[in-house]
Image (cartoon, grey):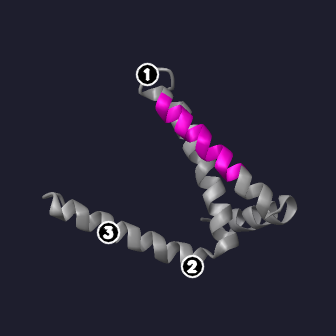
Amino acid sequence: MENNDIELFQNAVETFGIDAQDKMCIEECAELINALAKKSRGRASKEDILTELADVSIMVDQLALYYGHEDFMNERRKKIMRLNERLLKHGNHNK
């Protein structure tokens, strides 16, 4: 996340409030879920998925800053390590 983004995301949470941004994150996640479901039926494109992924990513960054970016990054690292361990158990590994 770039410094300009940090200021922008903090400003968004301060302007709209955390409750509104929590709800917006829920909405953006639902739109991503919907796009992924439509993709399986040939009704959403790669661009549709990328658009929704970007929206979710922006909301996740805002919430991570509000709830604790360092704690979020620590939890993210743990999840990545767990994924790598699972891949190792299945004969795949991080190269």
Identify the residue shown where x is 24% and y is 63%.
86
Magenta stretch mostly in which secondary structure? Answer: helix
Q: Amino acid at mark 3?
A: Arg
Is residue 25 highlighted in magenta? yes
Q: Which residue is mark 2?
A: 70
Identify the residue shown where x is 70% and y is 71%.
66
Q: Amino acid at mark 1?
A: Arg
Which is more foreground, mark 2 or mark 1?
1
Would you place residue 93 above or below residue 55 in this image?
below
Identify the element where label 2 is drawn: helix
Q: Which residue is mark 3?
A: 82
Q: State the separation of the CA atoms marked 2 and 1.
A: 39 Å
Would you place residue 1 above or below residue 37 in this image?
below
Q: Position of residue 95 (x, y in %)?
A: 22, 62
Q: Earlier in the sequence, mark 2 or mark 1?
A: 1
Q: Amino acid at mark 2?
A: Glu
Q: Which residue is mark 1?
A: 41
Is residue 63 highlighted in magenta? no
